[in-house]
Image (cartoon, rainbow, N blue to C red):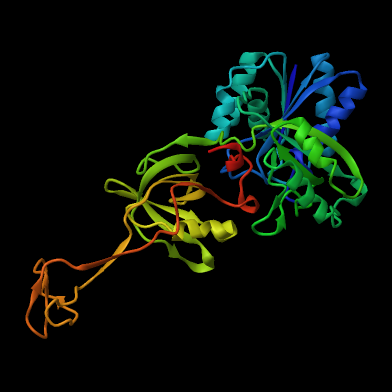
Amino acid sequence: MLLGIDDTDSPSGMCTTYLGALLARKLNKMHLPVLEARLLRLNPNVIYKTRGNAAICLEVNGDIDRVFETACEMVTGLAHFSHENTNPGVVAMENRPRPDFYWKAVRDFCTTEEAIVVLETAGAHYKGFKNGRGLIGATAAVCSQVPDMTFEYLTYRNSNVFGTPRFVDRKSLFEAEASTYPHTWDTVDYENNCVVCVPHTPDPVLFGIRGESPSYVTLARMQVDSEPTGAEQIFATNQGTDAHLVDGKIGALAEGFSYRITGMVCTHAQTGIGGHVSIGLGDGDTVTRCMAYEPTKGFRNVLRALWPGDRVLVTGSYKGGSINLEKVCVITLSQAGTTRPPVCPSCGARMTSAGTLKGYKCRKCGAHETEPQVTFHDRTITPGWYEVPPVARRHLAKPLCRGP
């Protein structure tokens, strides 16, 4: 049977994956073996998400009524019901439905009513707490089909130290990444010399290692020196897969969707207040703005190196009229050059414009030229893929170490 849970956390604490890890341990002790634990990231642009918009699915052997009752009891005891946006959902069913609802929840927006239609059709057990919004993620989790699966080894703190500073040895994290990359990723960020896998929020997570297989994330985890853990769980996930992206066209982009888009660079990069960098990307007469925000650090220099006429493919979420960039693929480069009035071949003076479409005239000797002087510049960028650093990467974004 499949058990889905979502929306048990709040900004002040808790974590749905933590509840899933504790529930898996409890079910195993009750001789209801958990065969697989899944962590599903859904549309990262949903406004009601707490942090990473994650839902969980446990595949369990045993009596569905007993498993469902146990899950509801744990949600009742651990979910942060006092927060207005915490509205848990618990779902249990014997067979996995078609994945349509899962894909919509990853790429689009769903309603509670749509989730209930799926649940009723499948004859599922389900319970929505408060307004029941968590039924959306819980339903998507049990419907999940993950053709490109990755894994995350999550460790959790002992409950008596929640809210206190975490201890995870920094050096051991860099050593773990060095020994397992590219089979694990986003443990640390070498370019910015910082740790990525340890959260700064008040939730129960101590650290998490992402990678391509249970064996590699376990190998990395075993090298990490930290405070004692209260629970640990390996989740199969859709993280690092680009599952949220759909093919899009400039001029036909919908708010809150994440796209792959090809176009021509139309403007030089502009640096705005706060260090955010933008370019215009065009397709015919239509132009949209692409943004690299300050937290993307050195990735902003990719935009600064682009010139009008460059053809690129970009990925990212469309929000507020901008594509918030995750990756850029430079397909072709234009000949980057600057023009200025030519030097007079007769007397060596710099010419000036003779008027619109009239070429250039030497004010010293009266000579004429029709073409400007063009100086071509060496490009500081080459065709290929570029990505935001690990410190700025979204959960679903596929790192280039896994391929473009």
Pinpoint residue 201: horizontal percent, then vertical percent.
75, 53
Q: How many labels does the image show?
A: 0
Q: Which corner quadrant of the image does residue 298 belong to?
A: bottom right
Residue under the image location 84 percent in, 43 percent down: 156
Residue farthest left in this picture: 366
Camera-side residue: 358 or 236?
358
Camera-side residue: 350 or 184?
350
Q: Which corner quadrant of the image does residue 147 belong to?
A: top right
Would residue 264 appear left or right of 384 to someone viewing this image?
left
Residue under the image location 27 percent in, 48 percent down: 285
331, above or below 119, in the image: below
Residue under the image location 41 percent in, 38 percent down: 248
Camera-side residue: 81 or 260?
260
Screen quadrant of the N terminus: top right
Residue under the image location 75 percent in, 51 percent down: 199
Could you tell me if residue 184 is visible in this image?
A: yes
Could you tell me if residue 109 is visible in this image?
A: no
Q: Which corner quadrant of the image does residue 73 belong to?
A: top right
Pinpoint residue 149: horizontal percent, then vertical percent.
65, 29
206, above or below 106, in the image: below
Pinpoint residue 361: horizontal percent, then vertical percent.
10, 77
382, above or below 19, in the image: below
Would residue 53 appear left or right of 384 to someone viewing this image?
right
